Amino acid sequence: MSRNTQALVVDAKRSAVQGISSRGNTRFSELEELIRILESRAVTPVFQPILAFGTGEILAYEGLIRGPADSPLHMPTRLFEAAAHAGFLTELNMLCARKVVRQFARLGLRRQLFLNVTPQTVLEVKDDVQRIARFIRDCGIDLAQVTIELTENQFIPDRSIFRQALMLFRGAGFRVALDDLGEGFSSLRLWSELRPDFVKIDMHFVQGVSEDRVKFHFLHSLQQIAEGCGSALVAEGVETEADFCILRDLGIHNAQGFLIGRAAAAPVSVLPAGVNRLLKASASLFGAETRS
């Protein structure tokens, strides 16, 4: 979707929103704020590092987004919920993707970029894959650096059509990640059908794994599945040393969370000293009872 086309769509939806206002819809002020953000492109990228246990280095950065600091739509959850209600989800998604790619290039982050994209957006822009690829290359980024991270708890009514759309992106050179395995649409069935390069495990199954035998065995099983189908796991929400060590010893491929680094406009390029210490430890420091 070109910027001119997108502007026309926004204008059309603005008229629809104004019609809603005349009927006294309580969401009107939020929708007006959303339109203001879209028209002024007032979103800011931030990046969170993803650690590769195998190399002990930063594998990638996930590109995240924030609305204006003084806006009720500052946090991404509120921002994307408002866009979904108003029918602006693809317009917002593409705006954020362009902003993230440009800023990633400006920062010179020579790692993988995990780029959040909704399934709806994949379907709606599938005919623009080559134009999107050209934009990314023009920013100085190799397509092999970019992983499309499928986000949002959206129901996919026709998996075969969605798979065909996703194959257009893979054929252009993009990698694919499923977000939040165990939450929303990211199911084991979708994993088997899409064969993603990365699978991100919902933080519910990660946080507290050092004290929870069920979570431990769940992650152990996922690791075995990942090895069998050629996907690399990313454990989300890693915040404690105890959980970190369990993940390390289980052979989970990658980890993301506050312990490794928070999302920031200028993200860390060097791992914290505490994380390096844990990586170099020869034996597990925690969770001995978890294995029993």
Image (tube, rainbow, N blue to C red):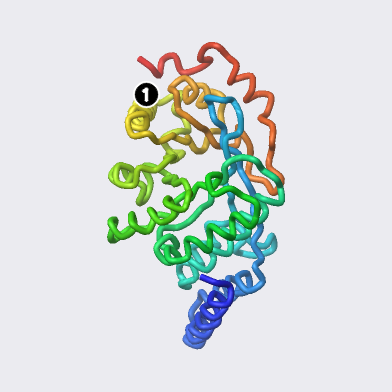
Dot 1, crowdedness within 10 Å: few (<14), some or many (≥20)?
A: some
In the image, residue 13 lies at what x, y percent? Answer: 50, 80
Q: In which image quadrant can residue 227 be found?
A: top left
Residue appearing at x 38%, y 53% in the figure: 167
The residue type indicated by label 1 comes to: Arg
Residue appearing at x 61%, y 33% in the figure: 58
In the image, residue 65 lies at what x, y percent? Answer: 60, 55
In the image, residue 43 lies at what x, y percent? Answer: 64, 62
Quadrant, the C terminus: top left
Residue appearing at x 66%, y 66% in the figure: 42
The residue tagged 1 is 213
Residue appearing at x 69%, y 60% in the figure: 69
Residue extending furthest toward the top: 282
Say above or below: 71 vs 141: below
Say above or below: 44 vs 62: below
User: Can residue 230 be seen at all in this image of the molecule?
Assistant: yes
Counting the numbered discs, the total is 1
Say above or below: 116 vs 268: below
Residue 75 horizontal side relative to residue 264, left or right: left
> Callout 1: helix, strand or loop?
helix
Decide which of 98, 28 is in the foreground and name it. Answer: 98
User: Can residue 214 be seen at all in this image of the molecule?
Assistant: no
Residue 52 horizontal side relative to residue 222, left or right: right
In the image, residue 184 lies at what x, y percent? Answer: 37, 50
